[in-house]
Amino acid sequence: MDYRILLQEENDAVRERYELSMERIRSMDTEEMQLPYGCYFKKVSAFIRRIERLAKRVEETGLSQEAGLDGALLTLEELREENHALYQDILPENYGESFTNPDYAVEVLGDGYGQLLSFLYTEIRADIVYAFEMRLMNITILNELFLEVYNLFDQAWEEGRKAPQEQLIKDSLYWFVSDYAEVTVDWRIREGLDPALSFGTDIVMEQDLTDLRYLYAYGEYVSETEIKLASFMNSLPQETIDQMASTYTEGFRKGFQVMGRDLKKKRTVVVEFQLGFERMIRRAVEYFREMGLEPICYRAAVESVNRGANGRRGYYGTSPNKQYDYDHRYDSALYMGNAFKERKLAVLRSAYETRRKEAAWCAGPALVETFGEEGFTPVNKKTALALNAHQEALTLAYANESRRIVNQYMPGDETSFTIIAFPKPEIGPEFEEVFRETIRINTLDYEKYQKIQQRIIRALDEASHVLITGRGGNETSMKVSLHPLKDREKETNFENCVSDVNIPLGEVFTSPILKGTEGLLHVKNVYVEDYQFRNLRMVFKDGKVTEYSCGNFEEDGSTGDAGNGEAAGVAGSVGNSGNGETAGTAGEARRQGQALVKQVIMRNHDWLPLGEFAIGTNTTAYAMARRFSIGDKLPILIAEKMGPHFAVGDTCYSFAEDSPMYNPDGREVIARDNEISLLRKTDMSKAYFSCHTDITIPYSELGDIKAVRADGSGIDIIRQGRFVLDGTEELNGALDEAAD
């Protein structure tokens, strides 16, 4: 069934409002408007009229979105031109003179007014996907908001004033977001739980994937990346597609198996991917259905009320402009307050209560990640909306409370997940070879690595703590404290991680004791989300991050001293941290670096605990990275298997600490808590941070890893970047290959 049939009643109910709002916006084309604001309203109204034409075409052609209004099929080039026209205003080459750019908006419209109207236009740009999905209610309420704000200006002009009071505009925007949370937030929950909302699934399963025009049916921005990915996927033999899809779906199934959870109780699975992977996703859907799981494919959020500041969840296309995304990551600063936080939580609870059955059926997410893009270093703009300290605290409180609500309806000990990653064409001219090598890495010998990793775990379980050092300019010197084991024949600190939830295989990990965990973590280059950090430095004391810095804004990439709590606090309001043209003084460069670390890695927390310590064993992945010189482009999913890694934030077992976990040898993993997560038993609000960010030291920067017993004697696991523990030497073969 076309899911839009499910929306027909809602669309019919709002049709009159929709038509009236469009009629009024069309009339604005002939009205006299005072500068400078008139140029803004002319620009945005022209965009809305384009949306009206788009919505008409989509409604008249149904699922066959390749057809024009006359019924004739649009060519690939015509679809490309239409897609470009929809997104052209925010593309990098045009962004300098776009009202979505807060710098330009403030320059033309003035401080205050510029930020408010830039926010409004950014929200209205969500109309693109609303039109493709025929969600007339969402278009209508945005139209009405636009007209409400315009009427404020029109009234001011009639009264001989240049503009209305800024607060009146802000009030209109606030009440729009708050009043319509029952539309926007409720829909967001529904589309993540209800397989009947099958817009994305229908494209994957019903379109002709050999005809690349299908990519334009989503309404997402389509770049050359999506075209090249889809073309490459079409070139692969079916057995390769089957292998990719099977590895991905079997990883999800194995996750339930190794965690001792019953997959038969579940009916749905959330499938997340980037456009271009549809051929693999189609086969994966078939495999999931054989498991009794119906796919849910939902779009990455487009409204500020649903967008996260870090990363996208769902299906998505290449970002038209990462700076645009960065500039608007904290648009919630416009309305975030105590009342709004409670309002959004109330809507969230209601949405889950309404769909408690669907929530109980959901097995969890299965993610396909991508990698290969050049690192993005953002420009921090004074004009961009930024959260103040109170709003940061409210945002973090909302994240924790919302997670508890979700866990109430979708208990963490009843669900699982899986993640797999593949390269994008941006990886370089050897893309196809890298892609095939990634497939090989994703399908390494499960049993072989399981046995090797079990040897490492046996050695680590003799230790009270682990010492990790760097080499070759890497200044890492870390001590990680481990939980005491009462019976090493029945208990273990480390989970033996092979190819189930985290693909590819290759790590052993634990949740350390915080007390006594201390030292400096230093990495020369590491990717986190879409950001490449240079000379990242983090200092730990009793398992907590106390200082941090990076060299992204230093001309030579160096950092000087690590940041301190005072500097980090200053940098937290990143919207006021500089215009990004040049870092200026070393102090300013350092503050900008600290601000970036705080936003992306610390997720705006003043401090975070060490939630995980792990040792990666996938030297084959490391050899691939060295062979193709792509080590600095690999996602954490792969990079974390290429050396020891440390994760700040929650443990790997958050919200499921009380569920037993066993390794294949039958021993229970008892290190599921730390001193912070244990606070859940007395004060849940202090137990979780709603983040978990991994940072890996690659083998090339790694010195030694030594397991140290309580009596001070030690067991060498790795010495000068090579595995020396008996039974692990086989892993050095790939390291030798990488060194050649």
Image (cartoon, rainbow, N blue to C red):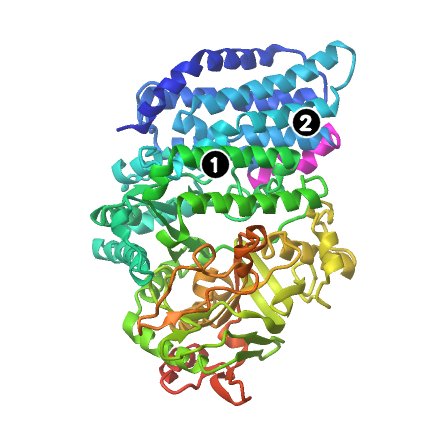
- Decide: few, some or many residues near mark 2? Use Cα within 10 Å; few <14, some 14-19, many ≥20: some
Instruction: Tell me what residue is drawn at x 48 percent, y 38 percent.
Output: 301
Instruction: Tell me what residue is drawn at x 48 percent, y 25 percent.
Output: 138
What amino acid is labelled 2 in the image? Lys
- Decide: few, some or many residues near mark 1? Use Cα within 10 Å; few <14, some 14-19, many ≥20: some
Image position of 544 (left or right of 264):
right
Label 2, secondary structure: give it.
helix
Task: List x then y, in percent, for residue 511.
Answer: 49, 67
Q: Quadrant of residue 444?
A: bottom left
Label 1, secondary structure: give it.
helix
Q: Is residue 101 above or below residue 26?
A: below
Mark 1 / mark 2, whichever is N-terminal:
2
* Measured Cα–Cα span from mark 1 to mark 2: 27 Å
Task: List x then y, in percent, for residue 120.
Answer: 61, 28
What amino acid is labelled 1 in the image? Arg
Work out whether residue 484 or residue 532 is closer to the camera in this orientation and state it. 484
Q: Which mark is residue 170?
A: 2
Q: Which residues are magenta?
A: 91-111
Task: List x then y, in percent, for residue 677.
Answer: 53, 59
Q: Quadrant of residue 341?
A: top right
Residue for badge 1:
349
Instruction: Tell me what residue is drawn at x 50 percent, y 32 percent.
Output: 347
Instruction: Tell me what residue is drawn at x 38 percent, y 35 percent.
Output: 355
Work out whether residue 149 or residue 633 is closer to the camera in this orientation and state it. 149
Task: List x then y, in percent, for residue 285.
Answer: 27, 46
Image position of 557 (left or right of 433):
right
Q: Is residue 725 above or below residue 165?
A: below
Q: Is residue 20 above or below residue 539?
A: above
Residue 96 magenta-highlighted: yes
